[in-house]
Image: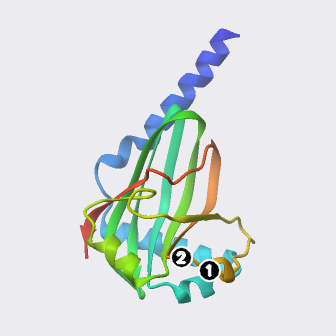
Amino acid sequence: MKFQSFAKTTFILIAALTAFAGVAEAASKAKIDVRTDEALAEFKSEISGANAVLAKAVGVLVFPRITKGGFGIGGEYGEGALRVGDRSVAYYSNAAASAGLQIGLQRRRQMLVFLDQTALDKFRASDGWEIGVDASVTVITVGAGGSIDTKQLNQPIVAFVFDSKGLMYNLSLEGTKISRIHED
């Protein structure tokens, strides 16, 4: 019985380490742009109200693939593009570490939608930005076929989490550090 528990724990830790093994070097701008286009297309086609949200946005930071893993101690990493209009203007990484009650491995897409120009300007001027410290972000989790009520979007920055794959107990964006990796 103890061996099975040890084996499961070891498997989860190896899977988490494997998921984060490739994060030392940022992906190319072209690769991030392709993934960003795919994530935006999926968001628009599968989430009712997505086009209305994007029409209100002054900027959208899209992380097409964030991988999160943990067993007590956890971490996550992803890379994405900031779109203003239909153009990528900068590229960012999203990283967080955490400790506490958590277990599992998950991949998800995440978008930060800037609905206020001042909030976007403050974000772009920062040299590293932490959710919960530098700005308050309202988080909305939506599944395929879900919908967004745009009347509830009354915050300057709204985060959408969608297309989750895997299982992770613990979803929080607090403490997530966003740093610039490429400038367009």
Dots 1 and 2: beta carbons under 8 Å?
yes
Position of 8 with respect to 135 (left or right) is right
Specify the quadrant of the image occupied by residue 61. Answer: bottom left
Position of 16 with respect to 165 (left or right) is left
Specify the quadrant of the image occupied by residue 133. Answer: bottom left
Residue 44, label in figure? 1
Extreme residue in the right direction: 145
Residue 113 locus on image (x, y percent)? 50, 75
What residue is drawn where x is 60% and y is 74%?
Answer: 42
Position of 160 with respect to 124 (left or right) is right
What residue is drawn where x is 32% and y is 68%?
Answer: 91
Residue 149 locus on image (x, y percent)? 71, 79
What residue is drawn where x is 55% and y is 89%?
Answer: 55
Q: Which residue is at the front of the view, 43 or 140? A: 140
User: Above or below — where is 120 with respect to 103?
Assistant: below
User: Above or below — where is 133 with respect to 86?
Assistant: above
Extreme residue in the top direction: 2
Q: Which residue is mark 2?
A: 40
Other-residue count near label 2 (Cα within 10 Å), few / some / many at <14 / 14–19 / ≥20: many
Number of numbered discs overlaid on the protein picture: 2
Q: Which residue is at the front of the view, 130 or 21? A: 130
Q: Dividing the image into 4 quarters, which one contains the C terminus?
A: bottom left
What residue is drawn where x is 68% and y is 75%?
Answer: 46
Residue 68 locus on image (x, y percent)? 51, 46
The amino acid marked with disc number 1 is Lys
Q: What coloring was used for the rendering?
A: rainbow
The amino acid marked with disc number 2 is Leu
Position of 145 with respect to 5 (left or right) is right
Residue 85 locus on image (x, y percent)? 41, 88
